[in-house]
Amino acid sequence: MSTFTIDSLENIDQVARRFINRYKDHRIMAFYGDMGVGKTTFIKALCKAMNIEDEANSPSFAIVNEYHSKNDEIIIYHFDFYRLKSIEEALDIGYEEYIYSGNYCFMEWPEKIEPILPDERLDIFIKENENGTRSIDVKVV
């Protein structure tokens, strides 16, 4: 397991660049963490590090947002499963088509769809430390 530390918002972009340089070959990423810990903020920083032109926002109500880099070299699907009431809702939005598209998939609240998560993915655990920093623990599944 690897660990990254975000000391403040001033160094989040640097951490995101190091993270994506190390894990750019992993297309499916499941982000775990408490409400307000910074999952969406870190995903925004990852999108910036990947030169995504679209503005990354929380897909809380849409369930999935799609982001593109210049010339569509990189496509990212950003999911927020927090509001799902069943796994069937994920399947109804075409979850499997997104996940098996070969594009990047960043998933917030993946525990809501645990039984249908792909076997090969990164599990990313973000937690707030007592001093206000964030620890990001990465496990290759």
Image: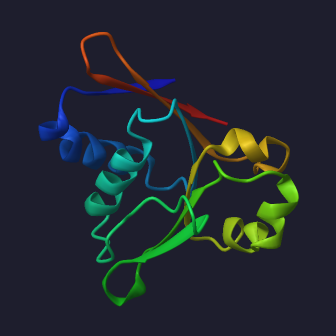
Furthest residue to the bottom?
71
Q: Quadrant of residue 48?
A: bottom left
Q: Describe residue 95's horizontal placement relative to residue 43 as left or right.
A: right
Asked if residue 136 can be seen in this view, the reply is: yes
Residue drawn 35% across and 89% down? 71
Q: Quadrant of residue 109?
A: top right
Asked if residue 119 can be seen in this view, the reply is: no
Q: Nearer the viewer, residue 3 or 40?
A: 40
Q: Describe residue 65's horizontal placement relative to residue 45 as left or right.
A: right
Where residue 54 sits: x, y (%)? 33, 76
Residue drawn 49% across and 34% down? 35
Where residue 72 sits: x, y (%)? 41, 85
Furthest residue to the left?
10
Judge whether 106 appears above or below 35 on screen. below
Q: Describe residue 32's horizontal placement relative to residue 119 as left or right.
A: left
Where residue 82 sits: x, y (%)? 63, 48
